[in-house]
Amino acid sequence: MPIAVSLSPGIAVGCLWWGMVGGGFPDWFDLKSDFRKPLRLRHRGASHGLPVALLASAAVYGLLIVISQASFDIFGVPISLSAQDATPWTLGFLLGVLSHLVSDSCTMSGIRPLLPFSGFTFWAIPKFLRSRHDGYLDRLFFLSSLGAIALFTIAYLTFRTT
């Protein structure tokens, strides 16, 4: 959201969409690997690491740059993307992936952010605050997050017109 605030509405919506895609990417990447049994990734394995996050973000940026150089239409509506719009959308994707990694690092299992180079396990919070993905602390953090989003949205809508 901090990236999207200063952009035009269409590009800002794209930032939010790419952020949601990035948020789901690590788990989606694990699931897609199930179809190729010899290359199967373990959940919270390499797909939940910083090297994969950076490579995936570079791939998204490259894809957006290629799309920005092409001209096409969808249902007769011409679609164009500026090369400068690729950067905020890629940052949205990367922040989405990183938010997923940080939230997974708050669980009992943590994450191994340096895979495949190191098996080091990282936790973002102390052990007494870590919970299962369906525990009471997870529910508390979820509701706190929703409250913070609502509060900042109300503040933004209130103060942007003044």
Image (tube, grey):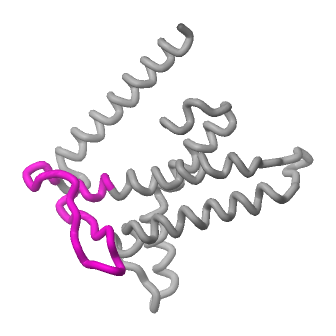
Count of marks overlaid on the render:
0
158 to the left or right of 74: left
Q: Nearer the viewer, residue 143 or 58?
A: 58
Looking at the image, the residue that sits furthest to the bottom is: 38
- Please give left or right for residue 95 compared with residue 146 in the image: right
75 displayed left or right of 108: right
Instruction: Give the image location of residue 72, x and y in percent.
Output: 87, 55
Residue at horizontal 77 percent and vertical 55 percent from the top = 68
- In-image side of 62 versus 80 (left or right): left
Residue 41 percent across, percent down from the top left: 40, 79
Q: Residue at x 46, y 80 (%)?
A: 34
Is 57 one of the magenta-colored residues?
Answer: no
As rendered, which of 26 and 85 lies closer to the eye? Answer: 85
Q: Residue furthest top?
A: 162
Q: Which residues are magenta?
A: 102-130
Instruction: Name above or below for residue 71 compared with residue 121.
Output: above
What secondary structure characterizes most of the magenta part? loop
Depth order, front residue of 39/119: 119
Q: Residue at x 38, y 75 (%)?
A: 46
User: Does residue 45 lie above or below 84 as drawn?
Assistant: below
Residue 130 vertical placement versus 141 (above, below): below
Residue projecting furthest to the right: 76
* Magenta region includes residue 112: yes
* Residue occupying image coordinates x 85% and y 51%: 74
Q: Position of residue 35 (x, y in %)?
A: 51, 82
Res 108 quadrant in image: bottom left
User: Which residue ends up furthest to the front in the rendered image?
Assistant: 84
